[in-house]
Image: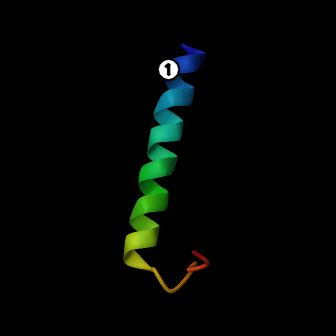
Amino acid sequence: MIPFVACCYAVYYALERQLKRERMPNSVSRG
């Protein structure tokens, strides 16, 4: 079950990062 948890965590982390980027674009804009 470790791989499943890791996959879920990765997806959750990616979604959170995307949401943060969309909500606060001027917070981390290096690209």
Q: Where is mark 1, residue-wise?
A: 4
Give coordinates of residue 13: x percent, y percent: 51, 48
**What is the basis of the colouring in this image?**
rainbow
Residue 10 placement, left or right of 30: left
Residue name at image x 50 percent, y 86 percent:
26
| Above or below, comparing residue 17 to residue 30 in the picture | above
Task: Single out the residue that lies furthest toward the bottom.
Answer: 26
Residue 27 placement, left or right of 12: right
Residue 8 placement, left or right of 23: right
| Above or below, comparing residue 5 to residue 25 in the picture | above
The amino acid type, in three-letter code, at marker 1 is Phe
Given residues 22 and 31, the one toward you in this image is 31
| Above or below, comparing residue 20 to residue 13 in the picture | below
Give coordinates of residue 5: x percent, y percent: 52, 25
User: Could you tell me which secondary element the residue under label 1 belongs to?
Assistant: helix
Residue name at image x 45 percent, y 40 percent:
11
Given residues 2 and 17, the one toward you in this image is 17
Give coordinates of residue 21: x percent, y percent: 45, 70
* Quarter location, residue 29: bottom right
Residue name at image x 57 percent, y 74 percent:
31
Quadrant of the image for the N terminus? top right
Task: Single out the residue that lies furthest toward the top.
Answer: 1
Label 1 environment density (alpha carbons within 10 Å; few <14, some 14–19, many ≥20): few
Task: Single out the residue that lies furthest toward the front.
Answer: 31
Residue name at image x 49 percent, y 59 percent:
17
Q: How many marks?
A: 1
Give coordinates of residue 6: x percent, y percent: 57, 28
